[in-house]
Structure formats: structure tokens, C-alpha cells
Image (cartoon, grey):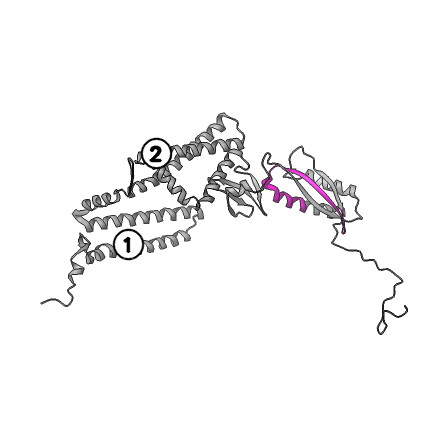
Amino acid sequence: MNSLFELPPAITGPLVLGPVELPFSILQLVLEFFLPLLLLAGLLWLGLKLLRRSLQKTRIEEKPRETALRWIRRAARLIWTLAILLLASRLLRAELARWILFALRALNQPFFTSGGTSISVVTLLLVIPVFYVAGWVSRLARSSVEQGFRRHLSVDPARAFSLLSIIRFTVMAITIVIGLSVIGINLSSLTVFFGVLGIGVGFGLQDVVANSFAGLIIVLTRPIKEGDRILVGDIEGTVKEIKFIHTIVNTVVNETLIIPNSVITSNSMHNYSYDDISILLCNNVQVSYNSDLDQVGEVLMEVGRRNPYGVAGEEPRYRVVSFDDSGISVRLCTWIRDARERIPAMSWGNLEIWRAFRKNGIEIPFPQMDLHVRSGVSLPGPGRSSREGD
């Protein structure tokens, strides 16, 4: 007599996927694979949560604590991956080797063939480490050559940046070509394929191509370089990194701008440190018409001479700019060492000018307007017409 709890053969029998019969049932798949993984996921989540709380209660600084948590998460991912492999091997048992070979044959089945080149899923997977290795080798070559420049050659930063960028791109291209040849991709046999593909996607990749060529132009002509202080529209920042397609700029409020290279080459951009990183900084201020402009000049020159951002040996400049409605506009211009310090230097100068004017009794006028009333003109009073007396 059959038990009331006896499961149907579709659940307890071998799992069949089309013509392939797997060596386990649906019940085994749930109980021996998914259920242990679910329990392990819960334990790992609970363990990570407890460890995070324990580390937060300690006196360890934030940066080492974040590093420890990052390594703990990596260890948890490794445990999860090993658990999947162990449970899968236990489920497949002796059939594991056969199924691995079957999967490799399926992944290695070519879906594109041209001449002596066959491209399969395995080939595409091998392309990923090729590009990774090419990036790593190019960065290593750039750092090695850069150290050589510093030790043996005196090359200006702009020229060194261009040479290092060209070396990096060249090493990357050579490594990619060699890597693709090693994994069995003959680039000469793929010329027609890439030509047809280029026609198809060319219109969709116009911006990418334009930005790539703009990046090459930036490297060769050096309108900007890493470390330059530039003004993009109304936003000022420092160039952090110039990449193949875009340029990364860090603003004065620590925001990150990602600017397409074509925008840099096709539009006007203010580069404060193109040839020389020192710039002439001008502080504008108004004084009243009762002020002694000679005394104003002496006070401003004294402020400019003790500017902590100034260039040694460069005298500040004092100018009377214009006679305005509210007062006389004057200007103090001071050379500062670094264009990246323009904003704090401007703030220091404005504050010191205000203090010096207050100390010497020099008035900074409010906006004002003089109103002159002509006498002898009678205004019409209540009940009088403006035409009376005509």
C-alpha cells in the first residue's frame, strides 16, 4: 500500500532536460544544493552583521576598519563560491568530470569562423584577461619610464606627460595584439568582419570615436595636462586624469567632473597653468571720494607685500580703475605662486584689505545716489489744478 506522503516519480526520479538525463532528482537538487546554500547565505549574512557591529564598537580608526570589512566580505564571497563548487560536485558525484568536459565542449563550440580563426564563448572569455593584462603592463611601463625620467633626464612636466601617454597607449596596443594572437584570434582574418561591423555601429559610436581622437590630440598638443587648474564654463577645478575618451576634473568643492575630450578640443577653456603655474591675482575694492588715493595705494601695497601666497621678489601693483557712482574703484594685483591657490589667496587678500582700511580709517562706501531738488518750482496742492496760474 502506497504511503500518503509518497512523492511523485517526477520529483524523486532523475531530472531530464531534453535528451540529457542528469544524475540527480529535483528533490535532491533542492535538499542537497539549494537548501544548504540558503542556510549558508543566512549564516554568512548574520556573521558579517555581527562582525560589522563588533568592529564599530572598537576603537579602531575608520580606514583600517573599512579595510578589515572589505577583506571579510571577500572571504565570505570565497566561502560562498567554494560551497557552490563542493555542493555541485557532491550532487554530480562520479559524473562530475564528464559534465565538466561536456560544458567545456559546449563553450568551445565556435559560432564564428573566418580563415584560421574560430571564435567561441571560451575565446571571448579569454579576451577579458588579455585586456586586463594589457592595462596592467601599460601602467607598469609608464611608471618605469617615469621613474627613469626623474632619475636621469630633466623633462618638463608637459612633455613628460605626452611621452608617457604615448608609451602607455603603444604598449597597451602591442600587448593586446600579442594576447589576441596567443588565444587564437588572427586579426588579419577579421578585417572584413570588423569593417562590416564598423559600418553598422559607426553612426552609434560617433561620439566615442570623436572623443578618442580628441584624447589623442590632447596627448600630442598638450592644451591641458594632469595637475592644471582650468575653468570649464562657470566651474573651476584641477585636472586629475586624462583618459582615452574623457578627462576627470576635481572642482574646488571636491566634486568630480567627467568631461568628454571632444568638449575640451572644440571649445574655449581657461587654463590657469598652461605655461606657468603662477598667476596675477587682482583684488578690486571701492573707496569713498573723500579718501586720499596716495594713502590708499600705500595701504594696498603693504597688504600685497605680506601676502603668504605671493611670489618672492615680485612687487604688487596698485591701480586706480574708475570713478563710479558710489566711489572710486581701485585694484591690488599680486603674483601668487600656484593658480590652484587662487580662491584662498583671493579670500585672504579681501579680508586683509578690509582690516587695513578699517585700521587706517579708509571708508569703503555703500551703494548711494545723490538726489538734487530744484528750488522755486511749486507743486500742485490739494484742490488745485496743475494748470492754475498758466
Q: Quadrant of the C terminus?
A: bottom right
Q: Nearer the viewer, residue 82 or 53?
A: 82
Using a 10 Å C-alpha cutoff, classify the residue at mark 2 as few (fewer than 14 neighbours), some (14 to 19) or many (20 or more).
few
Q: Nearer the viewer, residue 20 or 198?
A: 198
226 lies left or right of 186: right
Mark 1 falls on what kind of element? helix
Question: Any magenta on residue 337?
Answer: yes
Q: Which residues are magenta?
A: 323-351
Which quadrant holds residue 143?
top left
**Residue at which label 1 appears:** 40
Mark nearer the N terminus (1 vs 2): 1
**Residue at which label 2 appears:** 188
Is there any visible trace of residue 179 in the rendered image? no
Name the disc covering residue 330, or none.
Answer: none
Q: Tell me the residue at 23%/54% (across/down).
A: 33
Q: Of the residues shown, which amino acid type is indicated by label 1?
A: Leu
Q: Of the residues shown, which amino acid type is indicated by label 2?
A: Ser
Q: Residue furthest top?
A: 152
Using a 10 Å C-alpha cutoff, classify the residue at mark 1 as few (fewer than 14 neighbours), some (14 to 19) or many (20 or more).
some
42 lies left or right of 235: left
Q: CA distance from mark 1 to mark 2?
A: 50 Å
Mark 2 falls on what kind of element? helix
Question: Any magenta on residue 26?
Answer: no
